Image (cartoon, rainbow, N blue to C red):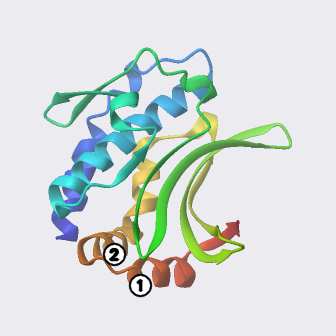
Amino acid sequence: MSDGLYKMLDADVSAIPAAEIRGSNDRERTMKLLAHVFLRLWTRMAIETGKRLRLTPSQFVLGSYDGQMRWVLSASVDFMNLADIELGTTIGRRHSLVGETYAVRNDERVRLVFSLEEEQVKAQSLMVNYLVYDEALKGFEAVAAMNSLKPAMPAWISTIAQSDAGPLWTYCKDNLECVGI
């Protein structure tokens, strides 16, 4: 399933009209690109696994489906102030792929992390983040972000399709850098 899915995801992401996506600054443009990536991921994962993941903000807020894996982003969303986009589910424990922008010493960046629920502390979930992709906002490319995600896809798909948290947790702990909670 993984090789075919990679090709479909590559085609889905390559079809994003990146040159046409505008924003008042790099952050707004990047969040719009991330919205396109996450909407396509949400759609493709539902088609290929038969499972519906939770998208936050929801797909209905972010845009409308135009058919043939094309989405039209909603004009009512303030992408400039959108903190992050999250795609995940709960399979015993909660997990999400999170796309977010952040700043370090006036350097604005974008990253993808897997956020995994490790344990409960005082009835609150403790989420641990594992780095998938990190780039300066100016250098963000949707295709490069997806290429960074590809090695984790078999474990993520297995976790979703089999309703077993083990594959994704094991992959993240063995192969990705823990970047915080």
Q: What residue lies at 37% left-to-right and 35% top-to-bottom?
A: 36
Contact flag, marks 2 and 1 (Cβ < 8 Å): yes
Task: State the residue in front, 169 or 145.
Answer: 169
Q: What residue lies at 40% left-to-right and 30% top-to-bottom?
A: 62
* Real-space CA distance between mark 2 and mark 1, rounded to the nearest whole angstrom: 7 Å
Q: What residue lies at 38% left-to-right and 20% top-to-bottom?
A: 74
Q: What residue lies at 56% left-to-right and 82% top-to-bottom?
A: 173
Q: Position of residue 120 (x, y in %)?
A: 63, 76
Disc assigned to residue 166: 1
Name above or below for residue 70 compared with residue 38.
Answer: above
Horizontal side, residue 69 vs residue 94: left or right: left
Name above or below for residue 128 compared with residue 148.
Answer: below
Indicate the amino acid at tag 2. Thr
Instruction: State the residue lying farthest toward the right.
Output: 105
Horizontal side, residue 25 vs residue 167: left or right: right
- How many C-alpha atoms fall within 10 Å of the one at disc 1: few (<14), some, or many (≥20)? some
Q: Position of residue 81 (x, y in %)?
A: 63, 27
Q: Position of residue 86 (x, y in %)?
A: 48, 49
Which element is circle 1 on?
A: helix
| Quadrant housing the N terminus | bottom left
Task: State the residue in front, 15 or 68.
Answer: 68
Which element is circle 2 on?
A: helix
Disc assigned to residue 159: 2
